[in-house]
Structure formats: C-alpha cells, structure tokens
Amino acid sequence: MTAASAVSGASAANLAGRFGVACTHCGLAVPPGLVREGAPHGTRFCCAACATAYDLLQSHGLGGYYAFSERREVAVRRTDRSYDEFDHPAFAELYVQPAGEGRLRTELYLEGVHCASCVWLVERVPLLVPGAVRAELDVRRSLARVEWDPRQVSLSAIARALDTLGYAAHPFRGVTRDAMRTREDRAMLTRIGVAGAIAGNVMLAALALYSGEFHGMEREYERLFRWVSFGLTIPALLGPGRLFFAGAWSALRTRTLHMDLPIAIALGAGFARGAINTLADSGPVYFDGVCVLVFLLLTGRFLQQRGQRAAADAAELLYSLAPTSARVRGSDGAERECPAAGLLPGMEVVVRAGESFPCDGEVVEGRSSVNAALLTGESRPAGVAPGGAVYAGTLNVQAPVVVRVGAPGEASRLAQLLRHVEEGAARRAPVVAFANRLSGVFVAVVLVLAAVTFALWYGRHPQAAWDHAIALLIVTCPCALALATPLAVTVAVGRAARGGLYIKGGDAIELLARPGVLVLDKTGTVTEGRTTLVAWQGDDAVRPAVLALEDGSSHPIADGFRRAWPGLAAARATELAHHVGGGITGVVNGAEVLVGAPRFVATRTGADADAWVRRLGDATLTPVLVAVGGRVVAVAGLGDRVRDDARATLDRLRARGWRTLLLSGDDPGVVAAVGNRLGFAPGEVTGAATPEAKLAAVVRLKAGARDRRAPVVMVGDGVNDAAAIAAADVGIGVHGGAEACLATADAYLTTPGIEPLVRLGDGARRTMRVIRRNILFSLGYNLLGVVLAMTGVISPLIAAIMMPASSITVVLGSWLGRSFDATATRPGGRAHGAAGAEPGTGAAAVAA
Amino acid sequence: MSVLFIVVPLALFVVALAVGAYVWSARAGQFDDLDTPAVRMLHDDGAEGPHPR
C-alpha cells in the first residue's frame, strides 16, 4: 500500500483519537471536513441525522438531553419510514386499546433504547408532538407505552417523531402474554411480601420464646407468644404457602416426585405438630421454621423464574421485523394499502426503494438490488430482475419493483427461520429436566429417611419419633440448596451487567464455565459490519468526480466513499445514470466518468480490469474502478474492516482451550482471507453459509461433541445468525447487532468489539466456583442435619434454628464470592461499578 | 409486663397495615419496572414533566 491509500486503517476510533472531535449529538468521531469553525456553541455533527435530531431537541427547549453523561454510544439510525400502516384500521384492531376520554393507547417496541438519556428523550415526545398525551418507557424491555388523542394527531406522526430521534418503532405483538406475566409477577411479589412480614414477626415471637426457655418465663406470656405465632402461621400457609401444597398435590396426582412434596409434608407436619402442642400447652412449636421456610423458598423460586423469563421474549421481538403492511396493486393498476397478514399468493405488491419486502415472491416488474443481510449475512446488495426471487424481511435498496406474492406470512422463509429460533429456545430444556430429576432423587431420599427415622424411633419412644422425623424434614429443607444457584447467578448477572455484559440465564453461565467450541459469524462480529474504503490506487484528482457520482446513491459502496472523504467537496455531475449490478455513469466537467464493478468498466472502456484489480493486492476487497473519458485512472478497494481487538481476543480464547470456528454467509474467498488474518486454520473457516446451513452446522457440532459438557457457543450479530444462536448451547449477540438477534441470544455484549468474550468466560468460571461451593455447603449441611436428626441429637427447635442459618451462609457466600469483574471500562467513560465496596472483585484483574 | 397483652396486638395491627399497603402497591404495579423510575427521577427538570399534573 502506498501513501496514497492513507485512509486505510483509519477506523472511527482512531479517527476520533487523531482529530479529537466528537459529534455533539451522538458522540462518534466527526470527520474533519464536517467540522465547521464558528458554528453556534461549537456544535458539530457526524451526519445529517444527528444535526436534525439536535435542531429538533433545541427548538423544543430539550437541550437538557446533552447534559447526561451516559448517552447513547451508537450512531443515530433513522429509517425515514412513513409508518402509514400504524394508522390502518387493522393495526388499530390488533394493537390499540382505548385509554378513556377518547384517547388511545398502544405499546411500541423501540429499537436502540440503551440508557437513562433514552428514557428522558422518549418521555418528552408529548412535547415534540402535540396530541401525544403520554409516553412511558420501560428501559429494560425497550417498550414504550404511548397514549395519544386521535383527534389531534395520528399514531404514525408519533412513530415518525420517535424515528427522527433514532428509535425505530415496531408494534409490540406480545401484549396478551405480557399481561399474563405481569399478573403472575405481581402475585408472586405479593406472596413474598406477605410471607416475609409474617416470617419476621413469627421469628420475633420465637426469639421471645427461646429466651424464655433459657431465662424462665411466666406461663401466661409464653402462651401469648405461642398463640400469636400460631395465629400468624395460619394466614402464611393459607396465603403464600398454598403454592407448595398445590404443587405437592399435582405431583401426587401425576405420580411424580417434586421438590414441593417434602416441603408440603414438612410444612403440614410442622404446623400440625405445633398446633397440637399449642392447644395442649406443652412441647415445642415449629411455627418460626415453617414461616421462614415459606418465605425463603418463595424468594428462591422467584429469582429463578425471572432468570428464565428473558429467554422467552425472543420470538415476540423477531416477529416485529417483517413489515406489517403492503401496497397491493389491483387489476386496475391502482395501489392500496393492505395488512401484510392479508396477502394471498398471486397478488401483486409494489415495494418502493428503502422498504422491506412483505412476503416471499417473484419480481415481475422493475430492476433493483436487494440487501438480504437479514437472511444471508451478505452485506453487499445483490441485483434482482424480473423473474428473480425475493424474500420477506429483506430490504429493497435501489428502485421500486413489483413482486408477485409467492409465500406470504407463515409460509415465508423468514417465518420458517423464526420457527427454528423458537424450537432452538425450547430445546434448551434438558438442563431444566436434569435439575428436576436431581430434585426428584433428593425428594425420594428425604422422604425415605424421614420414614426410616420415624420407624426406628417409634418402637422405643412414639413421642420422640414424631419430633425426630419433623426435625429431619425441617433441617433437610432444600432452601439453601434452592437458593444456592439462583442467588449466585443473580449476583453474577448484576455485576456482569455493570461491566457491559448482559447475561440472561443461569444456564449460560454454567455452560460458559468450561471451554468448548466457539463459532463466530464474520460480518459485524469479527468485522465492523459496514463497507469502508480500505485501499485507493491511482489519480487522487478524480475523487471529487467519484463523490459527485456516488452522491445520492443509497448503495453501501456509496456510503463507503462518502465516509472516506467527508471533507471533500463533490464536483457537479450531469447525466447521472445508475446501472443495476454495474455502476454509475455521469458527466463531470465535460468528461464522461464511470464508477463501477471491474467487468462493467472493462466492457465500456476495453481496459484490462484485472490488472487494476491486482494492484489492490487484497482479494477480500470489493474492487471499484474509476474511468474518465474512456480510460481507467484509479481503483478503489472497499471492504469490511476486521475489528482491532479481534485477533488478540481470539488468541486469548484459544489459549484458554476454546476451539474457534468462523462461519459466514459471505463469499468463501473473502471469509478465507479474513480467517487467515485472524489465525484460523483452513478447516475452521466456512463461507457462503445460509442461515439454515449455520443452524445445521451448530446442530452438527452439538451432536458431534465428545465431551457433553463442552458447550457449542455461537457468536453473531444478525437475524441470519438468530436460528444458530438459539440452537447453540449458548448464543451471544455482539454490540450493534440486530435487535432480534440480541433478543434470542443468552448473553450480549454492550460494548463494541469481541474482547468481552474473554471476560464472559472468566466470570462464568468464577461464578460456577461460587455455585459449586454453595451446593457443596448446603448438601454437607443437610447431611450433617440428617445424621443429627436421625440419631435424635437435635430437636425440631434446634432444626428450625439451623435451617435459616444455612440459608444465610449461602446468601453471604454468593454475595462475597468473586464472580464478574465489575470494573470493566466502557469506551469514553470511567470504570463503572463499585468494585471497591465488594470484597473479592477488586483483586479480579483477570480481564485486564 | 402485662402491657404486652396490649402492645403485641397493637404491633400486629401495625404490621397488618404495612402488609396491606405493600399488597396494594404490588397489585397496583409499582414493582413492575424497577429500572426505569430510578433513572426517571434524575430527569426532573422543572415544569415540563412527561405526566400531566
């Protein structure tokens, strides 16, 4: 490469470093040519979208947005869609509810929601759009609840305003399930709260009774406290505790062993024994143990439930990708809007440039290029002509086309892909099944032991037989065991989130703890995922002419040129003509200029295109030839840059025992070259893989794994990876990936690059150590308890004291245990988290 | 010490009130979203709140 190719190697990051200029709106590097000296308040913008958003906010007095220290770190992506379908009656029927006073309400899923400033911005939409009454954002789920007055404003206008701010809106299609889940959550929280309050008060009464035991207590006060705890325990069992009796009952009916069974027996027996003793006014009462048991078990169950919850969200979000409406052309040639669900095979739909196809079908009119990255991961648009096939969800880039509907809705390739995703999510069940089997064994052992204890003691001392059996049931209560995993996982997930890693489920942590096979997507994962000008050979003087031709084109190649020379003023071009699949021609300063693919330029000029392409010296780049007046004067190489941290990260992962594979939908030659640069062996690289092939590869890897415990991990960024991500043992989405892919993934990275993968593995390993320690402790504790109870050493009273003690130990163990390093830095920010306040994490400098 | 016969029921009554308040707030959805309100309160920038007052 010569000095002429100075742009090569200039990523956004080191551009920012070199010029030190950040966009006022989004914080990305501003290309030097766009920095206007003397702009009011020293503002500068990386693109027109940011400038528009800035003006919009300032004109409504919302400049306070820029006071937030934590703002979005991604470029504003506006789609400029019309959102007309949001006003369609069919849309209203599906998603809109009345909100009283003639207002309407709906929930919108927003892309690009990340942090505090997003909440602020979205909730100020009523100030931007008169007629919008209220907007509330749930930042964790990216759901905005919007209320508006249909007499003043349409929903599409609100959606367009959100789009301008960089939040593309989609209707949220999981409304019913969401309402059900909210009800469940609230019921569980109510149970935990009630059980907690009762347990606390019964413990207080028990404290009085225990001290009375040692220091003496008048009968009347003792009786008072016994009756108080008796009275409190009844609602605890009838209310929150009913869950366990219901579970035990259904386990009995289906003749299976369930954790609820010994719990229900312990609760029931403890309560019955305590009630009899209270009435008889002698002997121990077990009410404190019973109440604390209910509370702790409910808590453990709730934590576990929440962890599993997020994975189920995946499919809902994926459905938001396909367009909800289509423009149908009738036999009279008139166009009318129609919900995508109402399309039938044989209909003709018009798809404009910049829109997604609403169905699978065949082009009957028009020529365009299609970005099928959604399905194939191939970032370069491919040309389509009449007779060519197009797929739902892919993007029409260049010109309007008419498509004859082949497979609409559920029959489309996208829908089938989504079904794979759902199936993949469901297939994760084996881990859960194993846990249930283990608990079944545990239950059986406890029940047998209790029966044995009872039988052994009954002959000698019938009264003691009851006490010892109840003591055994209470002391072996699996609450420490039930808390051991969810608690450690919850703590780990919280710390990881502060370090830029979102982990959705405990099973991901469990699986990532030991090295296995790591399958990486190429585009957008190990590369930056956008076309950049990497090499330029030839006459620099033609650059303004190239820009003139590329100006106004939405092709990624044109974007690449515009980003490469932002400061350059474009020349004036006339007679512009776009040749689909070839290039652009035009006249600049009286000379005909051609910019296009080598074959296109060669046939028009007769030049030796191959010789020019060879001058680039890099087969992974897309060559673009520039000809002026029939003579080739320059060649540009555009490509997708490999991320700066990719090689180092991969080497470290390999050193930790991971086998790495590169699996991409891109051209095999390009994939091989990138793989070679990143240290992959030739056999570890696969190109031209369709989403279905990626899925098959992951399934094959899982089936062929020698060690069942070595996980198959899929890392990707696009919807084309989603099925493979769902099918893999652990799916990981990278920063900037498609929302749908992030929704499917078990974990995703909120900072750019793949370096966090190393931290993910290390943190998972340490978390597993904490979990193993917790389980070992609680099992050992139970074993000790069993021995003591069977030999009659401990009374139910001592057992009731020992039981919460073990839980507290597990809680402390999880909290103090070293799991994730919360000190990871975020770009441009200081270290987040409170490592100093957490003993143990401070020393965990492994992620350095 | 016979005051216990009054104080303990009184304490239980207060507990019942607190539990009642908690159950009401849980049912009313105040615990549905624990992340957003935490950042929303930082935004209180004067007259122009998102909620009509």
Image (cartoon, helix red, strand yellow):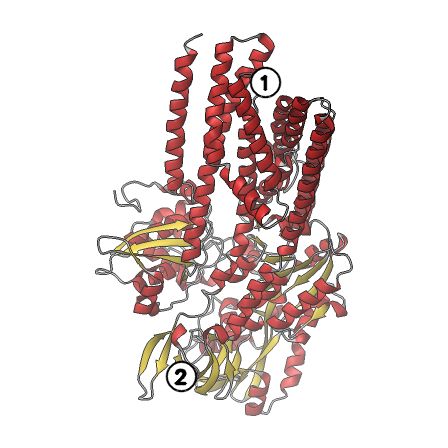
Vertical arrangement, residue A376 with respect to residue A256, above or below: below
Pointer 1: what residue?
A: A283
Image location of residue A845, percent across then percent down: 68, 41
**Seen in the image, is A759 located left or right of residue A241?**
right
Callout 1: chain: A
**What secondary structure is found at the residue carrying circle 1?**
loop
Image location of residue A709, percent across then percent down: 73, 54
Mark 1 against mark 2, which lies toward the viewer? 1
Image location of residue A486, percent across then percent down: 60, 42
Q: Nearer the viewer, residue A162 or A506?
A: A506
Amino acid at circle 1: Gly
Which picture quadrant has residue A785?
A: top right
Vertical arrangement, residue A477 with respect to residue A573, above or below: above
**What secondary structure is found at the residue carrying circle 2?**
loop
Amino acid at circle 2: Met
- Residue A618 appears in view: no
Residue A71's tag is: none
Q: Nearer the viewer, residue A273 or A92?
A: A273
Identify the residue shown where x is 62% and y is 38%: A262
Identify the residue shown where x is 68% and y is 68%: A697
Pointer 2: what residue?
A: A347
